[in-house]
Image (cartoon, rainbow, N blue to C red):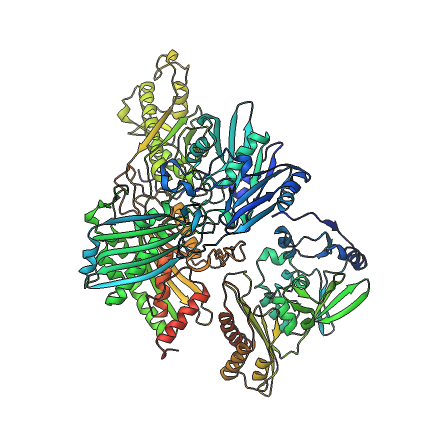
């Protein structure tokens, strides 16, 4: 049935979540208030590193409207913000962040005290009067600097991590050519339109502690809170509101989340905290800052024999909820889509006196793709091979799938690339972009004196990490469907995606499917929305549960209609005979009524036995991850007089396995791509020598707007469905951003006429102008 | 990001406003016009005036009119008023091309021309405009009224000749001769961002050569100023690449650029060269 009304999978249907968002009816955390609530203001360190000599809160305590002022001593029984259970790394635990600084402050913005007052103005007045005396300690502002002291007897190099396989020494010994690059990615992060926010509320009558304003990973955070606060799992619940962007940053547990909860219990009133923009730019997780000393060994044809990379990861002042995950993902993904026979990566995981770092969209992968693709461009230049050709010679072939990368280190999981036709996508992208004609055109324009160039970023993404997720689906007496998940919505279209999957499997209109997420009291498990896994994991679970409901419905209908089940189908919420829509039929609502507890009749068992009605709970379990893959192509033009880079064209080509809603995937890819342009060209958290952050407003931290954004060309392919789940789903959340830094770097190098020139992101106009000067100095004959 | 407490005053006339200002100025009283610089500064608690004298309700301060050979711009005239040419001829076109560079559309609806002058941010487009075109400012207080030339008005970074008790009621821009050509060129890293450097060029032509050249540079030094060396390089020369290059080199050589963590003095100097050339070319084309 080509025009089947219930074929929802793969269609760009309108988003279910939009009406409240576009009519102003949405409720973000700042819109939530509880009677009698207090407002919290955090007093933060203005020093990057120092010993706390004293904290004087006496004046603040006496100010009007102030209910309490806390320092670390007041919450001495509360431990540091814990890692997620699955990130537990014993050696890193001493580097966790205390809820309020104890003994030392380690970055500008480090919470030292918390003021609780009747309104946010009074809270801020009182916070200003808290006097913190600090004896300054040596400041480490770069992971390149020699490690210093984190605490007595503990250095700032928290770990040296190794990933390796193959005979790396032999690879370099046998190489025709060895290319070494010194590469840096700049410090930047996600800047959602909605800043963080948290409201703690304790209901003494029910002994229930609630955190409102949760995002991203409600159940993971609930687990951590249960551990940290020593409460029963059923006595602390977290609740998601509308969320104005996450990007990995929003929704992790931070000191402020713990503070509002503890204060709600101890002060006996709800406590609200809304982060301001300056706090966000000083305190929310940052990322990306790495310095790589990368070498690649190649044979005479440019085939990679080995990659050897030593890098320095700037973690900032503490290790947050992810442990060393970003550095790990960097190491796992350096080889990307290429066949690399021997590999060695050494990561110096170092703390510095800057804002702590954690995951930001495509964590570790934006960085590793920049490194890897710089190496590929360098190989092409050194050996005089076309940049597309050099990539093709090294790509893992479709017939090698699944392709296993097994590391020597027993604690490092294998990477099993599940499916993919990497060369096929590169061909498709190059053809769609008009690569060959483009090269000719760019040559002509360069001959005319323009600084224009094209670049490539190719990568493998990773998503759908398990192990398990589930979903509960129930059909009500009206035939409307409720899907309860432990997912989360950060604006990515979670509800619509789940509704489409459910609608397709069950045979109903997706608009009749209501999707619940983000409330830990409604379902005891859930993976949330992070690391591009919601569609794969929760989506697959919804598919399983919906098929179970379908089977129950058809079995019941078979009895009600006296028709064999295999002759029945569900179309637009009605069970009908497969051979034609005329004839007897029964709606899902009628079946739900018939199956309701206490009802009697055909299809219903003994009323006394109890029955969940037309409902089911389904699970999806996997031990593997899925690997979507992509190609980014960019064309840039440099203004010779200013160093400003204009992105003339950008294409994101991405294989998602199976596209549930192409329109929403396109939105994810375009949004991610523009964020990637931020990290490539505009955004940088700059610190001075004393560790003072220089970018704490949006006047200094430059986020690209529509005016900077080119029209992003998107090519979504479904050539390599994942064999690991029934729908073939991969994921789409991070494919738009992953390769942007790499592609822009390549394009700028091409424009300058020195493909290897770009070693550092972001490419600010000042830096590009320096590159131009270097290039001019190298070839004095050019204009 | 909540301001400290302040007392709010809303006078209805200029006389009331200056009387109030005289009263509260010793106690850190400030004028509130568009608030697009002051209010964020208060939110950061970098400014914490004890009193705000809001002039938005003062009669007559929103007037924008041609007074003889001068354009009079009242203290409450918003940036957005210049989106379309406010006077016939090239000045109106110039102002409407400059205003596009000021922040973003919503900010231009509230922020004021005179507020920008009183704020005296080195990156202010209107400060550069007033200085390059020899604008004048009218300051009123209970002590009387005085007129100050733009170059004297702007004394340094966020510093003006206004006394604490003076209200900038009006700015005036002289209408240039009909044959005056203008070119404005600004560099910023992102749309609506602060100018990293900008150049405003103006000149007439007499017998095929440049006359009355004006070349102002903003965002580069602590305050905008005209660059006599560049103007001399243009005076009496035929407009074209040779004269423009000479002026560009002279301007770049004459400025003493500010430095910050993202922008070296050297880079700003390069920008002055580029922007001078482009402003002059733009005036010519």
The residue furthest front is A153
**Residue A522: image location, x then y, percent:** 45, 28
Residue A295, located in which quarter of the rendered image? bottom left
Q: Is residue A27 in view from this perspective?
A: no
Counting from the top left corner in percent of width and height, residue B224 is at 61, 71
Residue at the image point whose x is 33% and y is 57% from the top: A371
Determine the residue positioned at 34% across, 44% down. Answer: A731
The image position of residue A497, as x and y in percent, is 39, 39
Left of B32 or right of it: where is A487?
Answer: left
Q: Tell me: A59 left or right of A169.
A: right
Image coordinates for residue A161, horizontal then vertical, percent: 32, 48
Q: Is residue A700 visible?
A: yes
Foreground pick, A700 / A516: A700
The residue nearer to you, when weighing B263 against A311, is A311
Determine whether, in the image, residue B120 is placed left or right of residue A651: right
Residue A389: quadrant of the picture: bottom left
Q: Quadrant of the C terminus of chain A?
A: bottom left
Give the farthest residue toward the bottom.
B207
Residue at horizontal 27 percent and vertical 26 percent from the top? A567
Of residue A634 and residue A52, the one placed in the foreground of this image is: A52
Q: Nearer the viewer, residue A261 or A162?
A: A162
Q: Is residue B127 above or below residue A409?
A: below
Q: Count up the numbered dots.
A: 0
Quarter of the figure with the N terminus of chain A: top left
């Amino acid at each position: 049935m080509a025009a089947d009304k219930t074929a929802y999978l793969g269609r760009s249907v309108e988003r279910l979540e939009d009406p409240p968002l576009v009519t102003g009816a949405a409720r973000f955390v700042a819109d939530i208030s509880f009677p009698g609530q207090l407002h919290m203001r955090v007093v933060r360190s203005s020093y990057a590193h120092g010993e706390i000599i004293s904290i004087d809160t006496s004046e603040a305590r006496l100010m009007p409207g102030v209910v309490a002022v806390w320092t670390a001593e007041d919450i001495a029984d509360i431990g540091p913000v814990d890692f997620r259970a699955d990130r537990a790394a014993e050696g890193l635990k001493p580097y966790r962040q205390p809820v309020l600084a104890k003994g030392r402050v380690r970055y500008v913005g480090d919470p030292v005290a918390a003021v609780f007052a009747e309104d946010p103005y009074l809270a801020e007045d009182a916070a200003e009067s808290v006097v913190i005396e600090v004896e300054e300690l040596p400041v480490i502002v770069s992971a390149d600097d020699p490690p210093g002291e984190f605490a007595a007897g503990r250095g700032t190099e928290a770990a040296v991590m190794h990933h390796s396989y193959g005979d790396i020494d032999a690879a370099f010994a046998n190489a025709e050519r060895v290319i070494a690059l010194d590469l840096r990615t700049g410090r930047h992060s996600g800047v959602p339109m909605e800043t963080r926010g948290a409201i703690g509320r304790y209901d003494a009558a029910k002994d229930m502690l609630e955190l409102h304003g949760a995002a991203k990973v409600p159940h993971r955070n609930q687990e951590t809170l249960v551990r940290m606060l020593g409460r029963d799992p059923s006595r602390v619940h977290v609740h998601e509101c509308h969320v104005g962007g996450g990007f990995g940053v929003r929704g992790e547990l931070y000191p402020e989340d713990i503070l509002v909860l503890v204060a709600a219990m101890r002060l006996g009133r709800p406590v609200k905290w809304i982060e301001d923009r300056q706090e966000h730019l000083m305190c929310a997780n940052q990322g990306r800052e790495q310095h790589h000393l990368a070498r690649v060994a190649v044979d005479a044809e440019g085939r990679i024999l080995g990659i050897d990379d030593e890098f320095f990861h700037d973690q900032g002042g503490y290790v947050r909820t992810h442990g060393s995950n970003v550095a790990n993902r960097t190491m796992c993904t350096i080889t990307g889509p290429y066949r690399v026979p021997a590999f060695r990566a050494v990561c110096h995981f170092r703390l510095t006196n800057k804002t702590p770092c954690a995951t930001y969209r495509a964590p570790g992968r934006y960085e590793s793709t920049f490194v890897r693709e710089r190496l590929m461009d360098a190989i092409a230049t050194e050996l005089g091979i076309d940049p597309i050709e050099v990539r093709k010679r090294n790509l893992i072939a479709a017939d090698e799938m699944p392709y296993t990368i097994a590391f020597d280190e027993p604690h490092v999981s294998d990477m099993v690339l599940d499916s993919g036709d990497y060369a096929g996508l590169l061909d498709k992208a190059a053809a769609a972009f008009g690569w060959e004609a483009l090269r000719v055109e760019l040559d002509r324009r360069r001959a005319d004196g323009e600084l224009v160039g094209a670049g490539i970023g190719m990568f493998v993404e990773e998503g759908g990490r398990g192990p398990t997720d589930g979903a509960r689906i129930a059909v009500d007496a009206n035939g409307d469907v409720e899907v309860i998940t432990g997912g989360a919505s950060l604006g990515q279209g979670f509800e619509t995606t789940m509704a489409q999957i459910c609608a397709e499997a069950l045979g109903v209109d997706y608009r009749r499917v209501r999707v619940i997420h983000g409330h830990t009291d409604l379902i005891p498990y859930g993976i949330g929305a992070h690391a591009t896994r919601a569609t794969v994991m929760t989506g697959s679970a919804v598919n399983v549960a919906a098929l179970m409901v379908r089977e129950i419905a058809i079995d019941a209908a078979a009895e009600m209609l006296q028709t064999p089940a295999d002759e029945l189908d569900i179309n637009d919420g009605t069970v009908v005979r497969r051979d034609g829509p005329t004839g007897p039929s029964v709606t899902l609502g009628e079946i739900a009524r018939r199956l309701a507890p206490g009802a009697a009749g055909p299809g219903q068992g003994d009323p006394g036995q109890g029955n969940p009605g037309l409902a089911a709970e389904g699970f999806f379990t996997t031990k593997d991850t899925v690997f979507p893959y992509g190609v980014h192509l960019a064309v840039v033009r440099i203004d010779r007089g200013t160093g400003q880079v204009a992105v003339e064209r950008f294409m994101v080509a991405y294989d998602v396995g199976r596209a549930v809603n192409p329109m929403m995937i396109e939105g994810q890819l375009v949004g991610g791509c523009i964020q990637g342009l931020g990290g490539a060209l505009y955004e940088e958290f700059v610190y001075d020598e004393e560790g003072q952050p220089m970018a704490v407003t949006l006047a200094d931290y430059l986020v690209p707007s529509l005016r900077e954004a080119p029209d992003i060309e998107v090519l979504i392919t479904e050539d390599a469905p994942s064999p690991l789940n029934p729908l073939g789903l991969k994921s789409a959340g991070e494919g738009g951003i992953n390769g942007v830094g790499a592609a822009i770097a390549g394009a700028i190098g091409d424009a300058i006429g020195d493909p290897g020139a770009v070693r550092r992101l972001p490419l600010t106009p000042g830096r590009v102008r320096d590159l131009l000067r270097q290039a001019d100095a190298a070839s004095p004959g050019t204009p | 990001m909540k301001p400290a407490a302040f007392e709010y005053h809303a006078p209805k006339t200029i006389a009331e406003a200056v009387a109030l200002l005289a009263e509260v100025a010793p106690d850190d009283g400030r004028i509130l016009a568009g608030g697009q610089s002051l209010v964020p500064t208060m939110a950061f608690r970098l400014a914490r005036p004890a009193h705000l004298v809001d002039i938005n309700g003062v009669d007559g301060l929103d007037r924008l009119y041609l007074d003889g050979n001068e354009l009079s711009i009242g203290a409450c005239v918003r940036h957005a008023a210049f989106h379309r040419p406010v006077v016939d001829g090239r000045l109106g076109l110039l102002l409407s091309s400059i205003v596009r560079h000021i922040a973003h559309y919503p900010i231009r609806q509230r922020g004021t021309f005179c507020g920008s002058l009183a704020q005296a941010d080195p990156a202010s487009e209107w400060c550069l405009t007033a200085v390059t075109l020899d604008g004048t400012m009218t300051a009123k207080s209970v002590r009387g009224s005085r007129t100050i030339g733009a170059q004297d008005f702007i004394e340094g970074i966020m510093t003006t000749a206004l006394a604490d008790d003076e209200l900038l009621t009006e700015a005036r821009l002289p209408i240039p001769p009909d044959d005056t050509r203008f070119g404005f060129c600004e560099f910023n890293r992102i749309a609506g961002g602060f100018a990293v450097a900008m150049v405003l060029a103006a000149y007439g032509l007499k017998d095929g050569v440049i006359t009355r050249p004006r070349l102002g540079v903003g965002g580069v030094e602590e305050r905008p100023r005209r660059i006599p060396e560049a103007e001399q390089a243009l005076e009496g020369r035929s407009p074209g690449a040779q004269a423009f290059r000479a002026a560009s080199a002279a301007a770049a050589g004459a400025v003493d650029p500010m430095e910050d963590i993202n922008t070296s003095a050297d880079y700003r100097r390069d920008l002055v060269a580029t922007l001078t050339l482009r402003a002059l070319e733009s005036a010519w084309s």
